[in-house]
Image (spheres, helix red, strand yellow):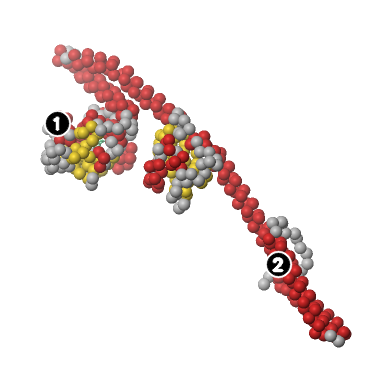
Amino acid sequence: MPPRARSAWTRTLGQLALVLALALAIGLLAGRVWPALAIAALGIVAWHYWRLRRVLDRLTSRQRPRATDGRGVWNALEQQLRQSQEDMRARKRRLVAMLRAYRAVAAALPDAVVVIERNSQRVQWFNPAATHLLGLRHPRDVGLPLGERLQAMQVSHWLAAGRNAEPLLDAPSPVSPDIRLSLRLIPYSHEYWLLVARDVTKMMRLEQVRRDFVANVSHELRTPLTVVHGYLDMLDPAEQPDWAPMLREMQLQSQRMTQLVEDLLTLSRLEAQDGVAIDEAISMGSMLATLRREAEALSQGRHAISVEDVAGVDLRGSVKELHSAFSNLVSNAVRYTPAGGHIDVRFEREGDGAVLSVRDSGYGIPAAHLPRITERFYRVSTSRSRETGGTGLGLAIVKHVLNLHQARLEIASEVGRGSTFSCHFGVDRVLSRDPAPIGATA
Ligand code: ADP
């Protein structure tokens, strides 16, 4: 027991003894000891009840308790209660101030922030930016399912994916289709999720300007290049032996430039096609036969080439784009494999989907380059790429084409041993072949 409480007890017990002693003395004087003691005891009990009631009143009243003086046990109790109430109030004030500060930060954010309940996806709280960007209104939308409120954005499926939802990069705002938003779902606790929407209108506009610029420049370069290329082709190096090496170089370079422009135009076309459904039936038998012909023409007998079709299914998509992707992979395999190596193209089933893989026994790619290898103009060795007539755009085209088909590119490579590039297609892209020559070899 703390010394203060101990002295309060001693004091109260002392007072009690004093009152009883006084009552005893009065009782002895008056010759009525028991009645005097009984009256004193009743008085003491009544006084204690009165103090108890005062404590209860103070606890239940919403007023701030007044400071009490006196040193008895009841005063000590009242002081103790008052102290803990003060502490609680101070803690509450601090918490409220902290909450206000957090809310102020969230309110000052330019991004829309919405807290939703995980299971029901009902809106719990949102900041003012959510009103400007997502059209949510206070208090109307609090407690309503977010998917319903953002019906125009068609995000219900995306929200349902929850933890696995990939960020949505370019979605029109329900407030105005001119506002483009990028959406992210952040599961920050077991019960609540955070939806963050960022205005990416300016970024998207810049991206569009960049795309248009590349497309226009490539388009404008195409005609003059065709003319130069045409005239260069008409010049026969045999007729001008002195000029022969220069003419050959000029023809080679103009061919490279034409290829570059063609590849840039292909990329621009693919970007413009983003999200457009492509749904042609692709005969993989003839696709693989074409790839074999192309590989043989490029290799000119320097490699052992095998093409196998063991999938027994076809694909659904764009013949032109998929051919361009596959043929880029085959051409890379030939160009980056020294003479005497082998190149295997294989089309097979993978679960419910299908996979086309191009394996070579070539130079291989160091692991450090793999994460960036599909970027435009990214090359492991610029000189080797140039020597073999590369533009640095082949794999970027492959990646775009596969994205258009909701397929993914996987690369496995070992320096000095070769590489395997595989294109994995989901079940939606697989088409059963009619009639089905399962196990046929192209
Ligand atoms: P490029 O026109 O230079 O071949 P790509 O985009 O097709 O451009 O390929 C990018 C880079 O990836 C190439 O420069 C090359 O270094 C590397 N690469 C691509 N395919 C292979 C392969 N089969 N074997 C080794 N390296 C490869």
Horizontal side of residue 48 vs 366, given as left or right = right
| Dot 1 crowding, Cα within 10 Å, few <14, some 14–19, many 20+ | few
**Pointer 1: what residue?**
293
Horizontal side of residue 276 vs 100, given as left or right = left
The amino acid at mark 2 is Leu
Residue 81 horizontal/vertical position (percent):
68, 63
Quadrant for the N terminus, please: bottom right
Q: Secondary structure at mark 1?
A: helix
Q: Residue at x 77, y 78 (%)?
A: 41
**Ligand 1 sits in which quadrant?**
top left
Q: Residue at x 80, y 84 (%)?
A: 34
Between tags 1 and 2, which lies in front? 2
Query: Dots 1 and 2: beta carbons under 8 Å?
Result: no
Mark 1 vs mark 2, CA separation in Å: 98 Å
Quarter of the figure with residue 75:
bottom right
Horizontal side of residue 262 vs 239, given as left or right = right
Quadrant for the C terminus, please: top left
Horizontal side of residue 430 vs 15, given as left or right = left
**One can see residue 257 in this view:** yes
Q: Residue at x 29, y 19 (%)?
A: 222
Q: Residue at x 37, y 24 (%)?
A: 212
Q: Secondary structure at mark 2?
A: helix
